[in-house]
Amino acid sequence: EQMKRVKREQRQFEEERRTEQAKWDEDRSEMVYQIEVLTTERDALRTKNENLQHLVETLEDQVKQQLNGLEQEKKRRESNIQEMEAIPADDETSAYSEESLFQTRWNALVSRFEEDKANRQESTDKLEGL
């Protein structure tokens, strides 16, 4: 009777050990899977970060180029204004020149505004595309 009880307890212990081992194996497999998922996500985020960094650098370069272009345009316009101011004119011609200069400046300003608006939209579209 005691032998039967010992054998039964031994079988029960073995069954519990196998069950516990199976649970540990399952938990380990799940952890390995989660590590693989997290590693993949980390790599994807690194790639996205690199792409965003490249985009930021590109946008910074574009802004610098635009600022340089604006500075050159400003110098050119100032030079044109100085040239126009140096031209003697009678009162009627002077008024016409001022009107014409105003219209030219206004058109250039509107054109620059539209261009800047388009550039901002393009930059926004690029950022949203990521």
Image: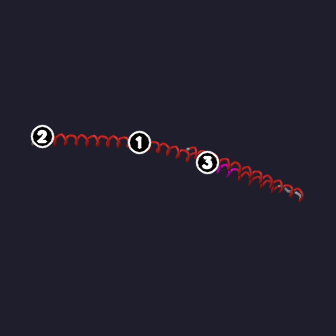
Q: CA distance from mark 1 to mark 3?
A: 31 Å
Q: Of the residues tagged 1 and 3, which is closer to the observer?
A: 1
The residue indicated by pointer 3 is 124
Q: Amino acid at mark 1?
A: Val
Q: Main secondary structure of the magenta part?
A: helix
The residue indicated by pointer 1 is 37
Q: Of the residues tagged 2 and 3, which is closer to the observer?
A: 2
Which segment is the magenta one? Answer: 65-72
Quarter of the figure with the C terminus: top right
Q: Amino acid at mark 2?
A: Lys
Q: In the rendered view, does 55 fall on the left or right side of 46?
A: right
The numbered dot on residue 123 is none
Q: Earlier in the sequence, mark 2 or mark 3?
A: 2
Q: Secondary structure at mark 3?
A: helix
Q: What residue do we see at 79% from left, 52% from top?
A: 104
Identify the image quadrant of residue 126. top right
Q: Amino acid at mark 3?
A: Thr
Assess disc 1: are there few (<14), some (14-19) or many (≥20) residues with their C-alpha within 10 Å of its C-alpha.
few
Q: CA distance from mark 2 to mark 3?
A: 79 Å
Q: CA distance from mark 2 to mark 1?
A: 49 Å
Mark 1 and 3 residues: CB-CB less than 8 Å, in contact?
no
Rendering coords of residue 6 (x, y %): 13, 42
Q: Earlier in the sequence, mark 1 or mark 3?
A: 1
Q: What residue do we see at 10% from left, 40% from top?
A: 3
The residue indicated by pointer 2 is 4
Rendering coords of residue 76 (x, y %): 73, 51
